Amino acid sequence: MSKTETSSGFSRRGFLTAGAGAVAVTAMGGWTPVYALPLRAAGSLDTGSAGGATLPAPPDFPADIDLAQQAYQNWSKEIMLDATWTATPKNSAEVVRLTNWAHSVGYTLRPRGAMHGWTPLTVVNGASVDKVILVDTTKHLNGVVVNAAGSPATVTAGPGATLDAITSALQDKGLGWANLPAPGVLTIAGCLAVDAHGAALPAAGQSTQPGHTYGSLSNLVTSLTAVVWNGTEYAERSFSRNDPKIRPLLTALGRTFITSVTMQAGPNFRMRCQSITDIKWQELFGAKGASGRTFQSYVESNGGVEAIWYPFTEKPWLKVWSVSPNKPSGSKEVNAPYNYPFSDNLPEVITDLLGKMNSGAPGIAPLFGQTMYTTTVAGLAATNSSDIWGWSKDIQFYIKATTLRLTEGGGAVITSRENIGQVIHDFAVWFNERIEFYKSKGQYPLNGPVEIRCCGLDQQADLKVPTAGPPTISAMRPRPDHPEWDTAIWLNVLGVPETPGMFAFYREMEQWMRSHYTGADYTFRPEWSKGWAFGPELPYTDGAIISGALPQSYREGVPAGDNWDTAVAAFNEFDPHKVYSNSFMDQLLP
């Protein structure tokens, strides 16, 4: 059978382009498969496949829950399924019934949100989907209710509510969040599954305002409701933040189904974001204590900082965020997010270069990087967006569904704030040496930018409700044996999918990071939503990391009664029949 055929003979191209097409951009900037082949014809109670569906009908599927055959693809389009059954429950009661049905017939369920991810935590490329049902949370399970008068103020949301929708509702009540991921299309349950975060830190001397956190979004949860096994059947169960059993669920990697979450919020505030493109990387990524315009100096004076370093260029695109109650002179006021259209809608010259690299001309990588840089500089000038000011969400959201979709590898270095410069310097020097080495051999395994960001850890002092502790397996979990470690430094490198040698380079990089960032000053953890455990040819295939080094990073320096092993035990307690699992998760979380 060819790679473009399903087991039923229906071609990938045929399914993906059938009817109105397989994907559409939504009003909120997201995307979702839109061409669906329903299980039952309209008005029919027939449980056989209808409407052209090519998959066998699930046995005795609940008659009143919508089910349709759809395609699936993740953000980088590296995990693509020609067709899967996708259920669309209308409420949490239907989720419970769907779960008990799946248990009774030996099916598994995978919650599906925005599909903005890289990892095989939802579905596994190449694995059988004969007994898998994706559960769309975005259509109906997306309610948002703000309690601005509470103490603390909170927002309660369904699993499919997007960050765009939640922060808009918060903003209407004068509330917000200090640390947001760049894509507002993400669903809240997806964010909590992988401890989503932004690029936010307080400036030197700036305190964390009540209701906010500079750690992960998981650290804002005050309570949640999930579908769990009660000894007889699956049922909803609510967990408060002071219940120790909630802690594994705060970063559960999709090993549960959250039906509702309540999160604290703080007073909204105005922010400024300045873009700087004239600092050479050698100065910007200066070592600890270096003089000049260094990454660390911008953190100290402003707070949030991100560097995007295009390949084979000298000057990164630096974004500097700061809290700014009043509009600075010269700043452009914005009233909506996504203020860098030049990076969301690439000009033809860049897409042409991408096409050539994918057509066997990897040596174009230096020109591609230089073109991306010049496009950024020109785009900032043309849109007057090098210095913008507005409400927190409008300044922090900047990645749309039309942004260039690349593979990512890297992870988080957990350390003290004073080490930011040294961590970044060491990585930049290593990375530059390695890409120049491969360039000298005529090889270009990496052709996307380096992204460097920082944020805080999941500090329990940020919680305004009684808490049993931080999320058990959040990358931003503090280490009790190193109370001075207060910062997560995110080091990621992007590449065009199918670039020759890319995964081997990621493997080399990951091995270097794990060996270099260790000891008394640092520890290294994966960024759950990105690439990790790289084998020579594919990510998520290094068994020694999956079963050894990675779990060990959640055993070191934390209590034995609250570590990786207790999280795995909790997942198996709440879902002993592994209805919410897949073949990869069975390996990662046995």
Image (cartoon, grey):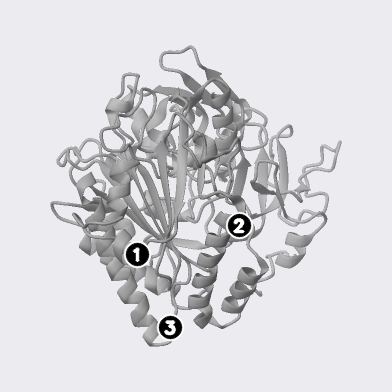
3D distance between C-alphas at marks 2 and 3 = 29 Å
Which percent across, then down, holds residue 169? 58, 26
Residue found 40% across the figure and 29% down from its top: 220
Q: Nearer the viewer, residue 304 or 254?
A: 304
- At mark 1, the secondary structure is helix
Question: Amino acid under label 2?
Answer: Phe
- Neighbourhood count class around disc 3 (C-alpha, 10 Å): few under 14, some 14–19, many 20 upward: some
Q: Could you classify mark 1 by the number of other residues whose Cα lies within 10 Å: few (under 14), some (14-19), or many (20 or more)? A: many
Q: Along the horizontal axis of the image, is 301 left or right of 182?
A: left
Q: Is residue 60 above or below residue 352?
A: above
Residue under pointer 3: 443
Mark 3–mark 1 distance (CA, rounded to whole Å):
22 Å
Q: Position of residue 16 (x, y in %)?
A: 73, 60
**What residue sits right under mark 1 in the picture?**
281
Crowd around label 2: few <14 · some 14–19 · many ≥20 (10 Å): some
Q: Residue furthest right?
A: 43
Mark earlier in primary sequence (1, 2): 1
Percent x, y for residue 337? 58, 41
Q: Quadrant of the N terminus?
A: bottom right
Do the CB atoms of the residues marked 2 and 3 lie less than 8 Å apart? no
Q: Is residue 589 left or right of residue 133?
A: left
Give the residue type at disc 1. Trp
**Identity of the residue drawn at 36% across and 65% down:** 280
The residue depicted at 16 percent of the width and 51 percent of the height is 521
Residue 559, picture quadrant: top left
State the image quarter where residue 487 is shown: top left
- Give the mark nearest the N terminus, 2 or 3: 2
> Which residue carries the number 2 mark?
342
**Which residue type carries mark 3?**
Gln
